[in-house]
Image: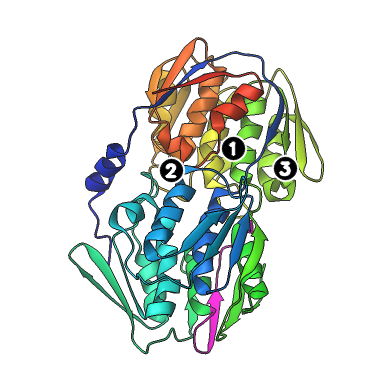
Amino acid sequence: MGNKFDFLTRLNYINLKDTMSKFEIIGEQKLSGEIKISGAKNHALKIFPTTLLTDEDCIINNVPDIEDIKNTISLMEKLGSKITKIGNNSYKINNKNVINFELDNLLSRRLRTSILMIGPLLTRFKKAIMYHPGGCVIGKRPIDLFEDLYQELGTKIDYKNEKYHFSLIQNKFIGCKYIFKKISHTATEAILLSAVLAKGKTTVINIALEPEVTHMAELLNKMGAKIKGIGGSTIEIEGVKKLSGFNTDIIPDRIEAGSFLALAVATKSHLTITHCNPDHLDVPLKILEQIGAKFIVKNNSIEVLPIKNIKATDIKTHEYPGFPTDLQAPFLILLTQAQGMSMVHETIYEGRLFYIDIINKMGANIVLCDPHRAIVNGPNQLICKKIQSPDIRAGMALIIAALIAKGQTEIDHVELIDRGYESIEKKLINIGASIKRVG
């Protein structure tokens, strides 16, 4: 089917949502204390669509209070889902009255993960309709991989009137052997959500190994699915007739935890990252060890000790358990404070280094070699500027840069940061940061 969306149209749509809010941050403040990690954005956004596979009650705990979750809830409620908040971060969901198989236009354009609802909707209604899924600038990517796997499972796909029309050829997904040409965690989750209630056996080769993917597979088994090989690169899924409800917890957000680790070392602060899972951060912690950072790892916390000087190193993003692409920007900011020359190699997304122009305007010395590689020379004193957040992860990186910089930095379009980080300014204020939301 190819990529049938107009990039500028989608970008302009995101701009329409802007509320003109910004952060005013005074840098070089002394930071100390504890930061509690929220539930993982990239896990919660996948568990909500999972509930569409059953008509029984589902309870999801430790859900982060972020914009993407609010949009997901609104999108599912338009399908007919009954979603009730039963605690500060818990939701009860029942989908027995879901009657709609077309995803809302505006809401689906805000969420890349809206495509994960297609499998469950096809299982329920034998058909589904959606516009091209959106997200931030990084999120606006082709869905060829998803189209391919749905077709292999027995789906006919037509594109007309700017919509994708999905329909099952045999009124049921049909098991198959599927090989991913490239690893994709969201596409892996899509085939899991489609194959568990399919007819026959599905073998999937070269799957993603992120903790969020593994937890979804384990949860599906608790619901009554038959998935073998969880934790390995090949899994077998034997289709079942019915799945039950569940009560589950969202895992800690390893990207948020890694971002705060970078912040702590970059600002030479004594911070303790709590309610995290250090086992999900092995490679980022190894990078910190290489540059000379000092930290103490416990079962669910990481204490970062302040140090004066750090050394340069090279970073290359890779699928889990490699270095996460979502931590590339925060760690690049950290490397602007390191002694020597570092190389950052982004292997997952093209164009994810283009925020470097903003950092250079703040006084960094970074050379963009090509869309995938950058050389960072340091250390350099960053200075305040009026800047704009280009996406979720680069937005968090700009906050770290502002906390390092001399003077007051203004970061516009912070609603993009709100999509992925819960109560970010409150958490920073609690450790001594001077940050104010305006607008």
Which amino acid type is marked by label 1? Asp
Distance CA(mark 2)–CA(mark 3): 33 Å
The residue range painted magenta reads: 196-211
| 199 in the magenta segment | yes
Q: Is residue 68 visible?
A: yes
- Identify the secondary structure beneath mark 1: loop
Say whether disc 2 or disc 1 marks the residue closer to the N-terminus: 1
Q: Mark 3 or mark 1: name the one nearer the start of the chain.
A: 3
Question: Is 171 left, or right, of 53 in this rendering?
Answer: left
50 above or below 110? below
Horizontal and vertical percent for residue 328? 53, 39
Q: What SS does tag 2 mark? A: loop
Question: In the rendering, which numbered label is found on residue 372?
Answer: 2
The magenta stretch spans residue 6: no
- Color encoding of the figure: rainbow
Q: Which residue is mark 1?
A: 314
Kindly report the secondary structure that dominates the magenta region of the rendered protein: loop
Residue 367 picture location, percent across and down: 43, 29
Q: Which residue is mark 3?
A: 275
Q: Quadrant of residue 311?
A: top right
